[in-house]
Image: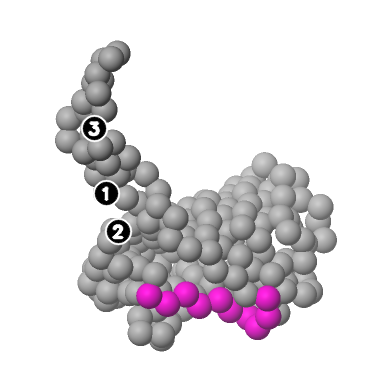
């Protein structure tokens, strides 16, 4: 769509307003939280309305220690537990050497860490989960490295190599969640 230029004194119509307000950007879908257990499952959030989504971690706390936080795609209330391929690289504030790790055919995407400190932050783009194609992820996160006084910053990318249309996701950890909160947004298409 070509960009329309308005001039001083011109009347802005409802049609113009609706067209330009509805082109591009993130649209808030919902906020989801858990205060117990070891996972948060969100169903029926990936639809044909959007082709890409953003998950924003707002709060992440567990009762003790530090644990990995995983994302699993789900359909009809069931998690997919195979064919997750991902890699991550990052640094700690106390060390200037990068450390890398990943998984081939893992049981979920490791998207971060969760601990007793509310220092975890995550933005994660999930591309084409609602289509019967391989779902891609790309994101970044920060977290407190338990017991070290350091902050970690990591970047993650990956592919779920199962060509299935998914309608939801699960965030899961080995610890007991005391407060986990995420917001979900859809990328509006122009």
Question: In the rendered image, is residue 99 in sight?
Answer: no
Residue located 53% across and 56% down the image: 56
Q: Please provide percent x and percent y for residue 86.
A: 44, 63
Q: Please provide percent x and percent y for residue 37.
A: 65, 83
- Label 1 Cα crowd, 10 Å radius (few <14 / some 14-19 / many 20+): few
Residue located 55% across and 69% down the image: 32
Question: In the rendered image, is residue 170 in sight?
Answer: yes
The dot on residue 189 is: 1
Name the magenta segment's main secondary structure. loop
Q: Mark 2 near mark 3, Cβ–Cβ under 8 Å?
A: no
Whole-angstrom CA distance, mark 2 to mark 3, is 27 Å
Q: Determine whether the residue tagged by mark 3 lies in a helix, strand or loop.
A: loop
| Magenta stretch: includes residue 165 | no
Residue stretch rendered in magenta on the structure: 35-44
Q: Mark 1 near mark 2, Cβ–Cβ under 8 Å?
A: yes
Per the image, the residue denoted by label 3 is 13
User: In the picture, which quadrant includes the N terminus?
Assistant: top left
Q: Nearer the viewer, residue 99 or 38?
A: 38
């Amino acid at each position: 769509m070509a960009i329309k230029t308005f001039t001083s004194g011109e009347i802005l119509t409802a049609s113009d307003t609706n067209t330009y307000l509805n082109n591009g950007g993130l649209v808030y879908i919902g906020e989801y939280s858990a205060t117990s257990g070891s996972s948060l499952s969100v169903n029926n959030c990936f639809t044909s309305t959007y082709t890409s989504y953003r998950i924003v971690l707002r709060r992440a706390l567990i009762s003790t220690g530090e644990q990995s936080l995983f994302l699993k795609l789900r359909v009809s209330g069931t998690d997919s537990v195979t064919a997750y391929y991902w890699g991550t690289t990052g640094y700690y504030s106390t060390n200037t050497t990068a450390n890398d790790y990943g998984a081939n055919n893992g049981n979920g995407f490791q998207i971060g860490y969760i601990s007793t400190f509310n220092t975890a932050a995550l933005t994660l783009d999930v591309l084409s989960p609602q289509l019967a194609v391989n779902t891609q992820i790309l994101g970044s996160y920060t977290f407190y490295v338990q017991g070290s006084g350091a902050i970690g910053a990591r970047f993650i990318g990956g592919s779920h190599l199962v060509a299935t249309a998914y309608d939801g996701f699960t965030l899961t950890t080995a610890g007991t969640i005391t407060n986990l909160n995420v917001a979900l947004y859809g990328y509006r298409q122009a």
